[in-house]
Image (tube, grey):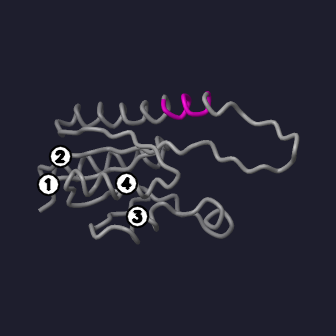
Amino acid sequence: MFKSILLPTDGSQLSERATATAIEFAKIHGARMTAVSVIQPLPFVPMADAAVLPDAGVFDREMRVNMQAGLDKVLAAASAAGVECDTVLGEAINPYEVIVKVAEERHCDIILMASHGRKGLNKLFLGSETQKVLAHTHLPVLVLR
């Protein structure tokens, strides 16, 4: 039934646990996986005229290196388990847009993704990418915690 799985990952421990589940799911269904990570640009909120800002170029390079390292871990784990896997490193202000787009472009049957389960002010300020994916895709989404 499921032949192509999309696994969004942010390199967190929660995402690493979701990776193990996604690999087992892929093995059971004889499916291939696509892992996707999204680099978000440095958020800029001017608080004062003399604000000290981090170097956006350094921020971008560090994010790119960290996200690629996370994707490489997924690729290695899938390979060790005998699951075909490729990776996509996207860039967007809103990660859900890249996740939904890649799922459509790769003709995925399902999205397996971790949710941090934030509540209260954390959910308000940090948002929920999982909720946004659910709202913008027609695909089934398996939410892992």
- From which residue to which does the magenta span run? 58-64
Label 4 or label 1, whichever comes before in sequence order = 1
Mark 1–mark 2 CB contact (< 8 Å): yes
Mark in the foreground, 3 or 2? 3
Mark in the foreground, 1 or 3? 3
Residue 53 higher or lower than 128, as above or below:
above
Q: Residue at x 18, y 46 (%)?
A: 32
Please, what is the three-letter code of the amino acid marked with disc 3? Val
Residue 110 higher or lower than 32, as above or below:
below
Label 3 or label 2, whichever comes before in sequence order = 2
- The residue that disc 4 covers is 99
Q: Residues within 10 Å of mark 2 (few under 14, many from 20)?
A: many
Q: Residues within 10 Å of mark 3 (few under 14, many from 20)?
A: many
- The residue that disc 2 covers is 32
Apparent side of residue 143 relative to residue 78 in the rendered image (left or right): right
Q: CA distance from mark 1 to mark 2?
A: 6 Å
Instruction: Give the secondary structure at mark 3.
Output: helix
Instruction: Give the secondary structure at mark 1.
Output: loop
Label 2 or label 4, whichever comes before in sequence order = 2
Instruction: Report the front residue among 18 and 135.
Output: 135
Q: Residues within 10 Å of mark 4 (few under 14, many from 20)?
A: many
Mark 1–mark 3 CB contact (< 8 Å): no
